[in-house]
Amino acid sequence: MNGALPLRAASLRLQGLLGFWPLATLAVFALITALLVYPVLKVVALSFSAKEEAAGVVANYVTFFTNPYYYQTLINSFKVSIGATIGAVLVGVPAAYFVARYRIWGRTFVRAAVVMVFVSPPFIGTYSWVILFGRSGIVSGWFADIGIQLPSIYGAQGIIFVFILQFFPFVFLMMSAAMRTIDQSVEDAARNLGSSELRSFFTVLLPLLVPSISTGALLVFVAAFSELGTPILLGERFRVLSVLIYSEFVNEFGGEPIVGSTLAVLMITVTVLALALQRYIAHRHTHPATTINPLAPMEQPKAKRIAATAFVFGLTGLSILPILNVVVSAFLKANGPMLLPEFSLDSFRAILPRLWVPLSNTVLFTTVATLLCALVGVIVGYIVVRRSGVLASTLDSLIMLSFAVPGVVLGVGLVAAYHEPPIALTGTGLILILAYFVRRLPFSVRSSVSMLHQISRDTEYASLNLGAGPARTFAKSTVPLVAVAVVSGALLTWSNTIRELNTTLMLQSGPNVTMSIEIFNEVVNANLGTASAFGAVLIVLNFLPLAILFWGLGKREDMLA
């Protein structure tokens, strides 16, 4: 009898270890390790391998920091990223403040426009600026006809300008969401003590907004530092780190994969440190408070209101101009890099014979990756919220690490990890799906986590008490309660995945061409008419889920933050 008790205890312990949630946690750990941790470690290991036997393990890093050709790219990346970050903060903070606090005209339109810029493919905006302000650009040509030479859109200044307009929505959306958590009484107290609006903002509101602004700023920095499409199209002789990594791995004249891996390690080091800095700043400046009456719009003198409206509409109009330009350009007659002011459907007729393959690939890869994100995301969200502990927090941190791993680096890692048997995935559609999945998984996880924090466990307890197992309880009780969050996360994942270029450039080959690759190739070959036609189709695909998300499900733009 006494011997049976230890056996029973061991049996129960084994059942607990082999239960649904322990096995699910183990499976997710294995998946993230295989698709994220292992590829990154392969890149790190490759960077320490030597091209020559006599060279040391750090020879590649010594070469990087002693050869101006290499280390100048790191300096250039910092230049454009820091410039873009400062610019995005300088325009994003006042724009968010004016929209939230002033009764400006068209606030709904402004918010919708910012969301459109946020999810639009960055490289589409880039080549649109080339159409407008390139050497043969429409606007450049107009000014050249009257003897005015506009500043070049190429080089560092052009990249920074485009980055600011592409990425300021990070700051805008983060700050907009944060301002809804500040109680009106905080500002009223300062104003009653004689502070002006400007002084109240800097002394009372700004300290409360620092975590959100810093988050937006660091996301701008990471996005700009790792972006590949824009520097390729506008950089010319101004080389940045992401472009150099790409050229070392795909250079048809023979690149240096070992050098490329070294560059990739340096890039991921910078992005991880940037996100760690953001978390530190947010933690140091967090001020928990209860919000009863959120900040409300203030009545302003007419002149002030007009000035604020002009600033906001000027910024959003400028940022959304590339999207509108692509759509309009698709319906113009084109002659290579020249677009003529004549309505034509020739560009659409030109892409029709070869539209099906990239379109079907894009929809298939994006949809499968999105479904995987939705399935794994809700499971991970449950583990993080309901089974909190060391394993859950570690899993959460690993998944959020994918935010810090640039797409170009992930592409390098997946190629290094899975280019040889027994698991040879390079060049297949599967590797693209897996890359999209691991890159966008945080969207679904965060959406599920947010909803689960708001849901009581009473229904789950009732289900378990009635004899349903953990798996059945999760499927029948929990998932229906978080279904709206899962769908929201999936739609957001779909919109962000369908425009992916950085990872796709590193992994795509042969018949697995996507819409983003087709657009990129057409732009590089100066076929702006067909590029615009492909771009118009991608824009429609990109915004369909947003229409469902905001108009069908009634979501607000702050959920993107």
Image (cartoon, rainbow, N blue to C red):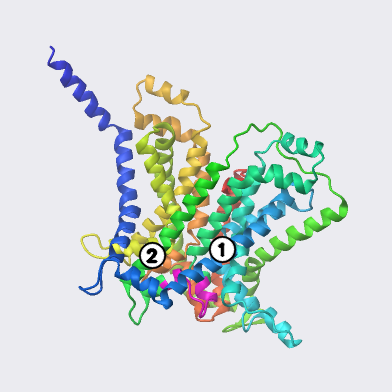
Q: Residue beneath label 2, please?
A: 264
Is residue 481 a member of the stretch shown in magenta?
no
Viewport quadrant of the N terminus:
top left
The quadrant holding residue 143 is bottom right
Spatial CA distance of label 1 from label 2 is 19 Å
Q: Position of residue 60 (x, y in %)?
A: 32, 70
Residue drawn at x 37%, y 78% as measured from the top left: 251
User: On the picture, is 77 further left or further right than 467?
Assistant: right
Q: Going 58% across and 49% down the picture, which residue do you hit?
A: 548
The answer to whether marks 1 and 2 mark residues whose Cβ atoms lie closer than 8 Å is: no
Q: Is residue 344 visible?
A: no
Q: Which residue extends farthest top?
A: 1
Which residues lie in the magenta part? Answer: 231-244
Name the spot of residue 207 as percent of width and height, x first.
65, 44
Frontmost of labels 1 and 2 is 1
Q: Is 239 a magenta residue?
A: yes
Q: Secondary structure at mark 2?
A: helix
Amino acid at dot 1: Ile
From the viewer's side, name the closer residue of 105 and 290.
290
Tally of numbered tags: 2
Between 262 and 220, which is closer to the camera in this rendering? 262
Please, what is the three-letter code of the amino acid marked with disc 2?
Ala
In x, y percent, where is residue 543?
A: 58, 57
Task: Please say whether residue 58 is visible from this viewpoint.
Answer: yes
Q: 367 above or below 233?
A: above
Callout 1: SS: helix
Residue 183's disc is none
Circle number at residue 82: 1
Which residue is depicted at the point 86% across and 55% down? 303
Residue count near mark 2 (Cα–Cα under 10 Å), binned few <14, some 14–19, many ≥20: many
Which residue occupies the extreme right position in the image? 302
